[in-house]
Amino acid sequence: MTSKHVAILGGGLAGLACAYEMAKRGLRVTVIEREPQVGGMASSFEEGDRNSVGHSDSDYWSHDFGPHRFHSNEKELMAHVVEILGDNAVWSKRRSRILMSGRLFDYPLELSNVLRNMPPLRIARMLIDYAWVRVIDTLGLVDYQDRNFKEWVEKRFGRSLADLFFIQYTEKAWGIPATEISAVWASQRITLLSLADTIIKTIFRPRNAPRTLVTDFVYPKLGGIGELSRGYQRRIEELGGTVHIDAPALRVHCEGRRVTQVEYRKDGDSHFIEADEFISTIPITDLARRVVPRAPEKVRQAIKRLGYVSIVFVYLKLDRERVTDDNWVYLPEKELTVHRISEFKNFSASAGPRGKTMLCAEITCRAGDEIWNASGETLEEIAVRDLTTSGFIQPGEVLESFVKRIPFAYPLYDLEYQDHLAPVLEFVHQLENLETGGRQGLFRYNNMDQSIEMGRLMAARMLGETESDHESVATQQRYFG
Ligand SMILES: Cc1cc2nc3c(=O)[nH]c(=O)nc-3n(C[C@H](O)[C@H](O)[C@H](O)COP(=O)(O)OP(=O)(O)OC[C@H]3O[C@@H](n4cnc5c(N)ncnc54)[C@H](O)[C@@H]3O)c2cc1C
C-alpha cells in the first residue's frame, strides 16, 4: 500500500515539526521553503569555521534574526527539542532588562529591583495610581472593558506603571498608539496580573531555587537557533522525506473544495506537487492570495486590511568581549529609534571569537517605509548613535556592520484584526484537505514552542492520534519573556 503524500508549505519550525512527525510515522512528505535555508523567523547564519571555536585565532560567528530563547513548561516538548539538538545543546542564563531613564531594570519586573532603582517619588506615584485603579475598579466607578491594550494594562497596573513599562515600549515597537492595539495581545503576552501578584512572588520566592526554565534556557551551542530547523530537516531527509529550499509556492490549485496541486518555482522553472493532504505555514494572507480559482472579493478586501510589523536588524561586530550580561535589553524611550538590542554570546559563548562580540539592534517599521528602504550605512548610523547615546558602546569599537530585514515579523493586532481575519480563515477552512497553522498560518503571536506544538498537533490529528485542535494553541494566557 502506498502511503499518503502530504505537501507542506513553509519550512519554519511549524512546517518542519509537522513534516518530521509525519515522516516518522511513515507518511511521504514534501516541504517547500521559499528561502535558501530552512528556519523561517528562527533561522540563523554562520561565518567562519566551526572547528576554529575555542582557538585564539577563531573566526567563527553565528547570529539569529534577533534574539531567540526557547521556553516551554511542557516536559515532553523540552525533551523533544533537546533530542533534536542532540549533543549541540547548551543551557544559558535567562536575563533581560529594560532601560528606563538611564537605569536598567530586570524584565519581567522584579519588585525589589524596581524599588532599588526607581526615585522614591516615582514609586509613590506608582503605588498611589495602583491603589486608585484597584479602588475604582472594585467599586465599579469606572467601566474598564479591556477595549484596547492601554485599558488592559492600566486596569491591572495603574497608569504610571503601565505607561512606564508597557505602553511606551509597545507603542514604539508597533508604531501605533496603545489605544489602537487589541487587548488580545496583552492578554496573551503579559501574565503578571497584578502588583499584588508581583509582591507575593517576590516575597515567597524560594532562595537558592534549583535551575528551572524560568532561570535557564536551552540553545544550540554552535550554529544559532537555526540548528533546530536544520536538525528537523536532516531527520526528515533521513526518513525519506523531501525538503526543497529556494522553492516559493506560487499557486494553490483547487477543484471544488479540494486542493489538487501546489505550484512552486525552483531553479527558474515551475513545478507541481500533487498530494493527498496539504499543510500551510506560510502567511495566511499570502496563502489566500495564491488560491486558484481566486478568493471572493470580500476575502480579498479582508486580506488587504491585515497588516504586519516588519523588522530591520542591524548587526554590529564589536572589538570587545561583551557589552552586556543580557540576552536582550528593551529600549522603550522614544528618543531612541532602536527598540531592543541583543547579544548572541549571552546565548552561547561560542557565538563569536574571543575578545569580540556582536550586538543586534532591532528597529520596527512597515515593509516599504523609510526605515525599511534605508541604506545599510544609514541604519548603522542610527544604531551606533542610539547605542552610544544610551552608553552601551563607543563608536570606534564597531568593526563591521550589516543589515537583515524580515517583512512578516509580527501580525498586527489592531482593533479590527479579528474581523478581517475571520473571512480569510473561513475561506481557507472550507478547503477540505488543507490545514493552516504556525505563527504565519494563523496570524497568531506564537513563540517557537507554540509553533512546534502546532506543527506536531497537525501531524497527530491527521494521523488520527488526537482530537486536539492546533488552533487552540497560543490562545490562552501564557508567559513570554
Ligand atoms: C525578532 C523576533 C524574536 C523572537 N524571539 C523569540 C523568542 O525569544 N522565543 C520564542 O519562542 N519565539 C521567538 N520569536 C517567535 C518565533 O520566531 C516564531 O514563533 C517561530 O519561528 C515561527 O515559526 P513558524 O514556522 O510558525 O513561522 P515562520 O518561521 O515564519 O515560517 C514560515 C515559513 O514559510 C516560508 N514561506 C513564506 N512564504 C512562502 C511561500 N510563498 N512559499 C514557500 N515558503 C514560504 C517562510 O520563508 C518561512 O520559512 C521571535 C520572533 C521574532 C520576529
Image (cartoon, rainbow, N blue to C red):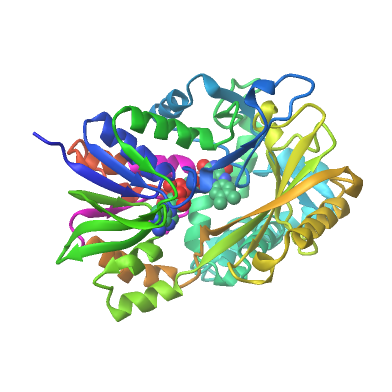
Residue at 66% x, 27% y is 49
Count every numbered label the image shows and give the total. Answer: 0
Residue 240 lies left or right of residue 86; in this view the side is left
Q: Position of residue 30 (x, y in %)?
A: 30, 43
Residue 285 lies left or right of residue 171; in this view the side is left
In which quadrant of the rendered image does the N terminus lie? top left
Residue farthest toward the front in the current orientation of the protein: 268
- Provide the residue span drawn in magenta: 430-455
Front residue of 357/442: it is 357
Front residue of 344/119: it is 344
Residue at 63% x, 27% y is 92
Snapshot quadrant of residue 417: bottom left
Q: Position of residue 164 (x, y in %)?
A: 72, 58
Residue 481 lies left or right of residue 21; in this view the side is right
Q: Is residue 436 magenta?
A: yes
Residue 344 lies left or right of residue 156; in this view the side is right
Q: Position of residue 401 (x, y in %)?
A: 76, 49
Q: Position of residue 366 (x, y in %)?
A: 59, 67
Q: Is residue 12 magenta?
A: no
Front residue of 472/38: it is 38
Examine the rendered structure and indicate whether residue 459 appears above or below residue 119: above
Examine the rendered structure and indicate whether residue 177 appears above or below residue 247: below
Examine the rendered structure and indicate whether residue 234 appears above or below residue 415: above
In which quadrant of the rendered image does the C terminus lie? top right
Examine the rendered structure and indicate whether residue 260 appears above or below residue 208: below
Residue at 39% x, 64% y is 286
Whether residue 178 is visible to the viewer of this picture, yes or no, is yes
